[in-house]
Image (cartoon, grey):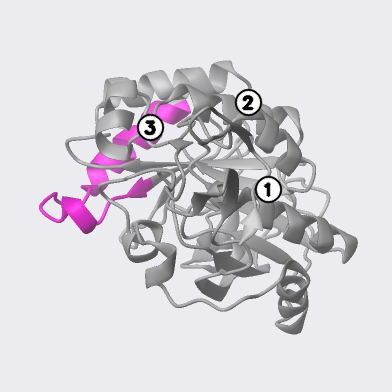
């Protein structure tokens, strides 16, 4: 086990200060995320250097559509999550106990070597909730930067300011799940609250981390178009209008297997609202019956990056981020580093 960085001692044990839950743990007890435990008055990460999943992915799968299109990413996950999403697609590892999932010790330097071995240019911390093993993410990321590799965070964004500040110094890009724009739904659907996630978005933007935002549209939970409108108003009003917003289709999973697939028309309504509220790059994901992940120039209206699944069919954005037809600046990182 690896001693955690973010905690303080209390009269009855320790209190984790990594995320807003602020879990208080007596001797031998774990926090909500399942991967942090009080042992003899110290807080330890039980999942540090013990990834449960390793994979090579296209960057588009994260999803990141304005961050070096076509780049291969070395993805990893450790057991645990600080949310309890009823719709979780990776619940077998996000909601598991560390001792129940097979792992092997892979130190931060070994992750960097594996990334290089598989000829990937970046490392993604993904699948579960990487903020729950923030120390491991930071140590890998710092080494990765020394080797010229990029770091990507795929996260629920539920974290306290200090650890987020530390991570921002070694992160290059992030996709944050903005689950909804309602505290009531966050509590019911995810087991958290909204404001810390909004604070994370603001901090990532302030620190210059490239950011894309995903909103999963779940029938009966997050498909209220008035709430979608309020979310988009907040985003455009806080300087996020040039950052990609992904409306993602829900598929029945975990504890919401009785909820229907998101109708395409619902996703298109959400996209229309977002555009009307000033969001310039709005995508529809997980909808193979609709070409919703092509990048369109907001100035001349021409298709710039055409995608088929995770593959790039055409790319008309120059490496310095301009539309090759009209010269419009297209925010993002477009250099080919495959």
Residue identified by numbered label 3: 192
Q: Residue at x 48, y 32 (%)?
A: 12
The image shows residue 271 at horizontal and vertical percentages of 39, 36
Q: Quadrant of the N terminus?
A: bottom right
Q: Earlier in the sequence, mark 2 or mark 3?
A: 3
Instruction: For mark 2, give the secondary structure.
Output: helix
- Is residue 262 located in the magenta-colored stretch of the structure? yes
Q: The magenta stretch spans which residues?
A: 248-275
Residue identified by numbered label 2: 202
Quarter of the figure with residue 205 = top right
- Disc 3 versus disc 1: distance between alpha carbons? 23 Å
- Please state which of residues 271 and 119 is positioned toward the viewer in this rendering: 119
Quarter of the figure with residue 266 = top left
The image shows residue 273 at horizontal and vertical percentages of 38, 27
Residue 302 visible to the viewer: no
Crowding around mark 1 (Cα neighbors within 10 Å: few <14, some 14 to 19, many 20+) is many
Residue identified by numbered label 1: 173
């Amino acid at each position: 086990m690896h001693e955690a960085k973010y905690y303080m001692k209390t009269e009855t044990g320790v209190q984790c200060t990594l995320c807003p839950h602020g879990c208080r743990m007596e001797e031998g007890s774990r926090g909500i995320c399942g991967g942090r435990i009080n042992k003899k008055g110290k807080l330890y990460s039980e999942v540090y250097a013990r990834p449960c999943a390793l994979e090579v992915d296209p960057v588009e799968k994260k999803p990141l559509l304005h961050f070096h299109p076509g780049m291969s990413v070395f993805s990893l996950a450790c057991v645990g999550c600080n949310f309890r999403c009823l719709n979780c697609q990776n619940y077998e590892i996000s909601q598991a106990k560390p001792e129940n999932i097979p792992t092997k010790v892979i130190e931060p330097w070994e992750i960097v070597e594996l990334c290089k071995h598989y000829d990937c240019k970046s490392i993604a911390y993904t699948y579960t909730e990487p903020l729950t093993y923030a120390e491991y993410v930071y140590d890998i990321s710092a080494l990765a930067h020394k080797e010229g590799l990029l770091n990507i965070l795929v996260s629920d964004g539920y974290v306290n300011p200090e650890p987020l500040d530390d991570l921002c110094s070694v992160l290059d890009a992030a996709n944050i799940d903005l689950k909804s724009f309602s505290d009531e739904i966050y509590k019911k659907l995810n087991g958290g609250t909204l404001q810390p996630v909004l604070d994370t978005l603001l901090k990532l933007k302030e620190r210059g981390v490239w950011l894309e935002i995903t909103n999963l549209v779940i029938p009966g939970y997050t498909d209220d178009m008035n709430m979608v409108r309020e979310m988009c108003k907040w985003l455009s009003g806080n300087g996020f209008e040039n950052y990609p917003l992904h409306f993602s289709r829900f598929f029945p999973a975990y504890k919401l297997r009785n909820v229907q697939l998101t109708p395409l028309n619902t996703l298109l309504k959400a996209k229309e609202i977002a555009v009307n509220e000033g969001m310039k790059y709005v995508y529809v994901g997980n909808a193979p019956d609709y070409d919703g992940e092509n990048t369109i120039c907001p100035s001349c209206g021409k298709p710039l990056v055409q995608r088929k699944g995770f593959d790039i069919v055409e790319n008309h954005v120059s490496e310095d981020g301009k539309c090759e037809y009209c010269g419009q600046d297209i925010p993002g990182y477009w250099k080919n580093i495959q």
